[in-house]
Image: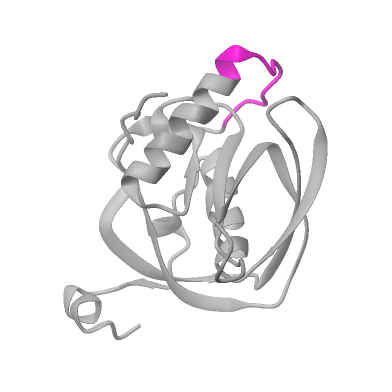
Amino acid sequence: MATRHILTKEDPALYKKCRPVTSFDARLHQLLDDMAETLAQSNGVGLAAPQVGVLRRAVLVLETNVAEDEDEILLELINPMILESSGEQKGAEGCLSVPGEYGIVCRPETVKVRAQDRNGQWFEYEGTGLTARCFCHELDHLEGRVFTELCERMLTEEELANGAF
């Protein structure tokens, strides 16, 4: 495994639509393993392949809605799609590709996705709260969208310092 460089908002690759994954091979597994290490090193909760310069439909999302005595679950989503969404949550959102900047974004409260695992097997997963937000955020990356395009407004340095959001 290796830590990969995370592209920042100035990089045009972040604004390109990603192609589907068609080969579920050692190369994909290496990408997913590297992305997992990169995500862990950056203390993020989600990472999309285009953020590390790979224009393929692959994302990682950390499921944080677990019992206190359980470990968080790292979800690998290949060729993901949103099947259903409901409710609404409005809150601060940031991105590893937009370091130090946060904005208010409205997302669904619950999101059900369908995706393939690293071996090509299809599965469905339903997330709520932060996990639902991450699903939407990371799938936006696959379409070449960054959260700043969806923000109601960006948070000021004062709001960030005071935690007033």
Left or right of 56? Residue 25 is right
| Quarter of the image where the N terminus is located | top left
Instruction: Give the vertical position of 130 relative to 88 (above or below).
Output: above
Q: Nearer the viewer, residue 110 or 43?
A: 43
Q: Is residue 83 visible?
A: yes
Instruction: Give the vertical position of 35 relative to 46 (above or below).
Output: above
Whole-percent x, y for residue 154 in the image? 32, 70
| Residues in magenta, as a range | 18-28
Q: Is residue 19 magenta?
A: yes
Q: Quadrant of residue 52?
A: top left
Residue found at the far front of this picture: 69
What is the chief secondary structure element of the magenta stretch? Answer: loop
Query: Looking at the image, which residue is at 50% across and 33% down?
Result: 49
Left or right of 144? Residue 157 is left
Q: Nearer the viewer, residue 129 or 152?
A: 129
Left or right of 30? Residue 127 is right
Whole-percent x, y for residue 106 in the image? 54, 72
| Quarter of the image where the C terminus is located | bottom left
Q: Nearer the viewer, residue 126 or 21?
A: 126
Instruction: Give the vertical position of 62 relative to 22 (above or below).
Output: below
